[in-house]
Amino acid sequence: MKQTLDSITAKVLRSPRTLGTILSLAQRIRPVARLGQNFFVFKHADVRTVLADTGAFEYGEGMRSKSPLGEFLVGMDDWPATLREKAIVRQSIEASERSRLTLALEQAWEGAALSPPQPPLVYRLERTGPGTPLDLVGDYVEEFLIRFNEAFFGVAPPADGMRSKVVSEQGRRLMAQWLRKVGSLVLLSPPASFGLQAVAERCAKELGDHLDQVIGAAQYAAESETESAPTILASLLQKHHEVTGERANRDFIRRHLCGLLLAANPTVIKSFVMTIVNLAAEQPSAVFDHEAADAGSTETVQPYARLRALASKNRLSDTTLRQAILEAMRFSPTFPLLSRTCPRHAHLQSPSAGSIVMNPGARVVVSPFAAMFDEAVFERNYLFSLSRPEDDYLHFGYGGHRCPGDRIAIALLMFLVRKMLSHLPAERIRVEAPEYDGPTVHRCVVKIDP
């Protein structure tokens, strides 16, 4: 029975429109539903309450066990034993974000500063035409992120041999496969339902072995005072030594480095692909040119075409682009459901469902997807709108459990979308349905009509 339910869950989670219909109905019928010791929370205010109260609603064993190489920052509760570890990782992320992010994005795009140098990705976009479709994953975002891993995280793909420093196309493909397969163990969809458990665990071991080699080389460089770039890996080693006065534990570095790579690869790939899918769809939308539009007016548009027109005139501001990405993701969020556990008795004071008592061990499943279609917060929720308050979006969680790398993820998405708008030779695009490798997206084709 459990395997059947897991299989149904996995298939539904890969179908945003089906899931959206189910959640919309559930929200109207029962804002907080109960099935035994399982509670399902759909309204915006209630979802934010659960996510914000990290004492009453913890990740629990279910989330922690999803990490193949051990616990990492996303999935660790605020316990005394973990607070120092979490602080080190957060400080490392913030330090690298300030000093390295902008440069790393450009280095990944141009490729010249990598080892070995790679051709600029601009050619992959500009060669796209009526007879040459673009695979958003394999031809673009996956390749970009493999380069970004080296420039920002300090993790290059495996070299061709034990004594070689040359990374081939095969090495990059292997790294992409590791991250995609291991990502199936940490994304919400159950990997067992896709027959991926064994291969994902094998890839996790291979990725862990590769990270051990990378970390060992970085530790040697740090201890020999060899000058190196301020990557996340270098920052983790430095911050750990500053806080503890000790040499960084390799398991600590490997766990968190693996978690950050997974957050920046399969999850960003899925977010980017679904952003483009929704930007390319014909959407009932609030008019883009707000100065010329009457309040409340709407039209059916392809948001991508409107953004492309703004970009071609150098009028696409970061604010507009950011808002468009957040709104596009609302229609197909990367994490439509999130799970929490009650370690002790908990009370959820719901504006719509009243006071709800949850016993120790209860599982609470919240739906950011449903919450971002709550009509009490998202007026005319069926519209693609660029005027919604940014704080209402729940793509990166909320409160104490908010993703610490949210600014990095948004920066990646904005960079990738802007480059695509600038260099893909098309005013309008057609996007085929994404193809999945388990719960992770591995192919999505963009076509340009003649």
Image (cartoon, rainbow, N blue to C red):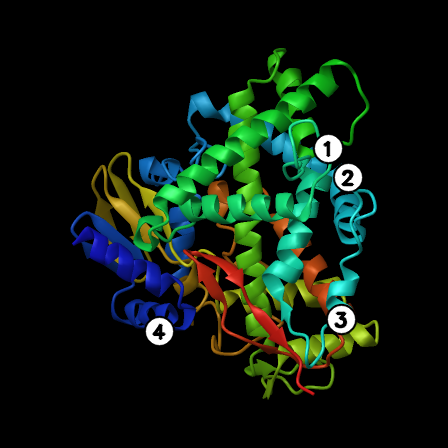
Tell me, yes or no, if residue 185 can be seen here: yes
Label 1 sits on residue: 165
Lower sequence index among marks 3 and 2:
2
Q: Do the residues bearing badges 3 and 1 touch, measured as CB atoms within 8 Å? A: no
Q: CA distance from mark 4 to mark 1?
A: 51 Å
Residue nearest the viewer, comparing 167 with 401? 167
Q: The residue under label 4 is which amino acid type?
A: Thr
The disc label shown at residue 21, or none? 4
- Nearer mark to the viewer, of 4 and 3: 3
Is 287 positioned to the left or the right of 373 in the image? right
From the top left corner, tell me how far across and down residue 41 is, in percent. Answer: 32, 57
Q: Position of residue 185 (x, y in %)?
A: 41, 44
Q: Residue at x 44, y 21 (%)?
A: 81
Q: Is residue 238 visible?
A: no
Amino acid type, mark 3: Arg
* Mark 1 or 2, closer to the camera: 1
Callout 1–callout 2 Cβ contact below 8 Å: yes
Q: Give neighbour class at mark 1: few <14, some 14-19, many 20+ (Cα, 10 Å).
A: few
Whole-number angstrom distance, CA of label 4 to CA of label 3: 38 Å
Residue at 34% in and 67% down: 23
Give the structural element (helix, strand or loop) at label 4. Answer: helix
Residue type, mark 2 in image: Ser
Whichever of callouts 3 and 1 sits on the residue coming sooner in the sequence is 3
Q: Earlier in the sequence, mark 4 or mark 1?
A: 4
Q: Residue at x 68, y 80 (%)?
A: 131
The C terminus sits in image quarter: bottom right
Q: Nearer the viewer, residue 199 or 23?
A: 199
Residue 45: image x %, image y %?
A: 40, 57
Look at the numbered disc 3 and give the secondary structure of its residue: loop
Q: With respect to residue 430, does 257 lie above or below?
A: above
**Residue matched to label 2:** 115
Residue holding disc 3:
127
